[in-house]
Image (cartoon, grey):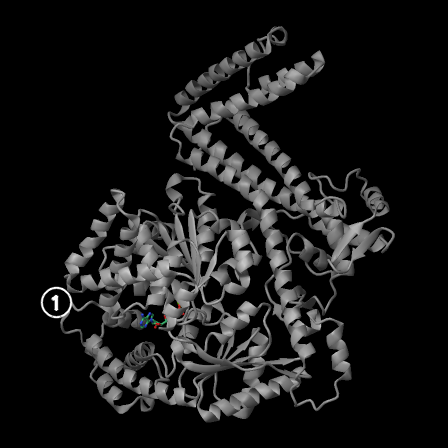
Amino acid sequence: MHMFNLLKNQNNRKFYKIIDQVNNFSNLLYKYSDNELKKLTNKIKIKIANNENESEILIESFGTAKEAIRRALGLHLFDVQILGGLILNEGKIAEMKTGEGKTLVAILPSYLNTLQGKNVHIITVNDYLAKRDSELVKKVYKYLDISVGLIQQSMNSKERKQEYNKDITYITNNELGFDYLRDNMAINIHDIVQSKLDFAIIDEVDSILIDEARTPLIISGPSEAPINKYIISYDISKTLYKNIDYEIDEKARNIILTDQGILKCENILNTNNLYSLNNPWIQYILNALKAKELFLMNVHYIVKKQEIIIVDEFTGRIMEGRRWSDGLHQAIEAKEKVEIKPENQTLASITYQNLFLLYRKLSGMTGTAKTEETELDKIYSLEVQEIPTNKKCKRKDLADLVYKTEYNKWKAIANECYDMYTLGRPTLIGTTNVEKSEFLAKILDEFNIPYNLLNAKPENIAREAEIITQAGRKSAITISTNMAGRGTDIILGGNPYIMTKIVLCNYILDIFHLNKTYNSKSVESNIKTQLNKITTKDIKTNLNIEHYIEEEINSVSNHKEKNNKIQNIYLEILKEYKILFNKEKQEILKLGGLHVIGTERHESRRIDNQLKGRAGRQGDIGSSRFFLSLEDNLLRIFGGEKIVNLMQTLNIDDDTPIESTILTKSLNSAQKKVEAYFYDVRKQLFEYDEVINNQRQAIYSERRRILKSKFTRDCILEYGESTIDEILNLYKNEKTTKGKIILIQKIKQLLSINDKFLTNDILNMKIEEVKHFLYEQLIITYDLRESYMEQLRPGLIRQLEKYYLLQQIDKAWQEHLEKMVILRESIGWRSYGQQDPLIEYKNEGFQMFINMVTYIRQTVVYLTMRSRLIVKPE
Ligand code: ADP
Ligand code: MG
């Protein structure tokens, strides 16, 4: 009822009708045999090939998938899940709350789109989720004859290629991006692993397209950084005076050199162009000045063991291992007189924005996207559609409690944890970073409250997901940073499936005396009886127990394996736990369900909502409360003067939370300021990367053409002809004979044409004749070169051609990337306050790109025309 009302409200009768039809079709399939069901895959494919009625195809494929899900998992898809599937299929974002069953939703559009012949990629935030979800859906697709691939970080390129070739592939955003970049650095066509980017469904889409989109993906290699430049620039920065040689823009954290400053630097350096792209100094000087004026020790960074370590200004967290980019880190190292570590040279890079825009069709799902609707639409052209929950959400979001000091806030949080613990209500506490979660953990230790602590470190993700599944058990207290356990929902009373697996696993490890911590007393007696049935003989030794159990449990009970003992025991225990956990769930529901505590407003409302959304899953009762203090970073940095005044005038007891409308308003506006700030950062990154993106596409497609080509001779001749054209263009416009002669010499040298042809002859020809003459010479010279090389070693010339082509493209492109960084930096300063730097960046970047392409052609032709030596291939 609830959903239909919402659907009608949204004027979505169209969907309502389709959902009905999907359900009806699916019901018809009930009596089909497994084999008959499987045959539908081919039937629908044929319908698609025959261009039959599209909406019929949609209904049939969704209905078929729904029935397969029922058979494989025993679950009946909810209508809202079908609605979600329809939205994804339309290339939009489906906002569906946590626990609504998005993993299964993705199956519907995946199935249809793969039937349509598209490559389908399901993108997740981590390896664990990719594996978990692919294993789940594999069971469903078995009924449909569709292959499922999975790519994990540890896989080599052969395995990757194989997995990409499956109908539907599960992969993380990170692996996808790096595979894309690596493919475009491949030297051999067979090394390319990725297939076409047709259709992607991004799970937790806000996290990938927004949170992760702040930093680009980069493949880098070592470079020869001019270490002395940092030191010289540091010395120079000491001789420059504020407001005379340079000015500081505090707000934008920028520094500009004045004309006088520029002159002074040029004099010291004995150069006439500080901005030269070939021997650039400007960014070294500016970085040195930034290090001098804007980056302060113990505020923005600390020095620990001769290393500069960044302090995150917003969270106050130490960011071990991270480095400021574009030479700033080195400038600070020079200032602090610690070892200057060379920069890595970017070999290839792309932003997530531009990576995902490569898909012909893109869609996504998450519990929280609506607040970022504008950005998703502007940058990705993705519309966000809210899907109503299957059951009405009964969570109570309680009013914020604001304390005067951080200390009092944490005290209040610990008290609340204590209350919940004694009451028996499961509680999840979200923190903004690891330090804070550890801080709270210490307080809870003092209170003697048991808890689980999760911090979203990649190595803990799998274990954390297990903890999260049990975070809904009675009296469970779970402290977690905001990313930890994302993608796993908290089930009140606990998750019997995972629990059974854990118990089974521990018990088996115990049998082998591998796991001393196993405590059989904690297991209910029936379950214990079941476990005792397992003997050492039942288990194949020396293997990965978890993997083994997984396989045993999931093995489809075909006739041969009717007596799968482990599976039987698993099912018995599962039955017990289901009863047990359900009882516990009822108890917890009476107590008020899961309680969520926020310890700080996050950098966007979206992340707050994500945290709150943990409670009240599938119509469960639950609550959330945020504890804040006037000393929180959000208020401190973005709160403005009002808050400072408020703090000074407030004259109340520290333990009493403050209620004030001014405060609530300030909080909201501070949070919006932070949201806007980060949006700006991403937008700028996107706009600047867009310039490079067009160039990248051009270079990558040229590269791909060469890689694929079996006859690169055409490519070389084409480059030769273009080069001739380019130089003749100059020739045409050249007034003086002397200038013309220089140009002819240049062509002759380039094409390695013998001097016996008189330059004078050319001078007397019409331009068209010159062109034809040179084209002819190009072919003649190349034929000669080719037959000479063929004598040395047959086939060598083709190898050489490809080698030169790829090598020169890659080298030039990498240098170009570096120059673009310098350009971006320097252009910002040059045109400050006059023209839109982005436009200048575009124009100059374009010119540089043209120059690079010309340069590539010329060098390739030059090198191939001159290849004499036998280059040992490999
Ligand atoms: P989300 O990604 O939306 O947070 P999941 O896909 O992780 O949710 O699913 C959460 C839980 O709901 C899983 O245990 C799943 O098996 C269960 N679930 C999904 N769809 C259904 C359904 N139609 N009926 C019953 N349980 C379902
Ligand atoms: Mg999910």
Q: Viewed as shown, does residue 701 lie left or right of 375?
A: left
Which residue is depicted at the point 66% across and 74% down?
665
| Image location (x, y in percent) of residue 91 | 42, 53
Q: Residues within 10 Å of mark 1 (few under 14, many from 20)?
A: few
Measured as percent of width and height from the top left, residue 556 is found at 20, 67
Viewer-nearest residue: 720 or 341: 720
Q: Residue at x 38, y 30 (%)?
A: 710
The residue lying at 85 percent from left, 53 percent from top is 239
Q: Left or right: 279 with respect to 601?
A: right
Q: Is residue 868 visible?
A: no
Q: Quadrant of residue 439?
A: bottom right
Residue 60 in the image: above or below residue 726: below
Residue located farthest toward the left when viewing the structure as drawn? 559
Q: Nearer the viewer, residue 858 or 543?
A: 858
The three-letter amino acid code for the residue at tag 1 is: Lys
Q: Is residue 347 above or below residue 496?
A: above
Q: Is residue 5 left or right of residue 281?
A: left
Q: State whether residue 419 is above or below residue 356.
A: below
Q: How many marks?
A: 1
Residue topped by disc 1: 560
Query: Is residue 602 visible to the viewer in this orientation of the structure?
Result: yes
Q: Quadrant of the C terminus?
A: top left
Residue at 57 percent across and 83 percent down: it is: 440
**Dot 1 lies on which element?**
helix
Compared with residue 163, is residue 707 higher up or lower down, i.e. above or below?
above
x, y percent for residue 726: 59, 23
- Residue 263: horizontal and vertical position, in percent? 84, 43
